[in-house]
Amino acid sequence: MTTKLIKIWDKFMALLKQGLTPKQLALSVVVSAVVSVFPIFGVSTIVLTCLALSFRLNLPVMIVFSYIIEPLKLLVLIPFINIGASVIGTEHTLLSFNAIKTSYDTSFWGTVGELSYELLCGSIGWLLTAIPLGIVIYFILKGILTALDKSGNQLINN
């Protein structure tokens, strides 16, 4: 039974890694998470594709993880706008998430034009929170994946 579990685990890790080091896999996951919560809807897949190709990251893992993380954007959009507005020193228009989502559903470019202040505040809030948090999570995840990789190799060799 243990041998079967080890084989399943090895196949799962091989599928995830696909030749990537724990560092590259951690970077793929963290970059995907950080880009996925960026407060502008509709840009994640394009940005992730460009980053994956540029830095030789695992695009399938990034896209799948992006779709898993995407609902988190719903929770952090308004807080990002509030943080950005606080940094700029002004008040935002107190739009709700539903108003922003409805605007996106109507017209992407119209939303960019009409809600440019909120998008700017949200981007500043994202920059000040998601990027530093992503860096911390990257180092933690890299350590965990490195330890799992080493323990997996030890199990295989024994």
Image (cartoon, rainbow, N blue to C red):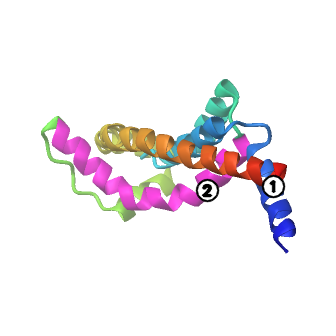
Which residue is tagged 1?
10
Q: Position of residue 62 (x, y in %)?
A: 65, 45
Question: Which contiguous range is marked in magenta?
Answer: 59-87
Q: Position of residue 49 (x, y in %)?
A: 67, 36
- Front residue of 52/115: it is 52
Q: How many residues crowd mark 2 within 10 Å: few (<14), some (14–19), many (20+)?
A: some
Give the Cα separation between the discs numbered 1 and 2.
25 Å
Residue 65 inside the magenta-drawn segment: yes
CB under 8 Å between discs 1 and 2: no
The tag on residue 28 is none
Q: How many residues crowd mark 1 within 10 Å: few (<14), some (14–19), many (20+)?
A: some
In the image, is residue 9 above or below residue 147? below
The answer, for residue 88, to whether it is visible in the render is yes
Q: Residue furthest top?
A: 54
The answer, for residue 43, to whether it is visible in the render is no
Q: Position of residue 91 (x, y in %)?
A: 15, 47
In the image, is residue 6 above or below residue 149? below
For the point 69% across and 36% down, the residue is 21
- Front residue of 40/110: it is 40
Q: Looking at the magenta stretch, what is its main secondary structure? A: helix
Direction from residue 93 to residue 153 in the image, left or right: right
- Quadrant housing residue 57: top right
Amino acid at the residue labelled 1: Asp
In the image, is residue 2 above or below residue 82? below
Which residue is tagged 2?
67
For the point 87% across and 68% down, the residue is 4
Amino acid at the residue labelled 2: Tyr
Q: Which mark lies nearer to you, 1 or 2?
A: 1
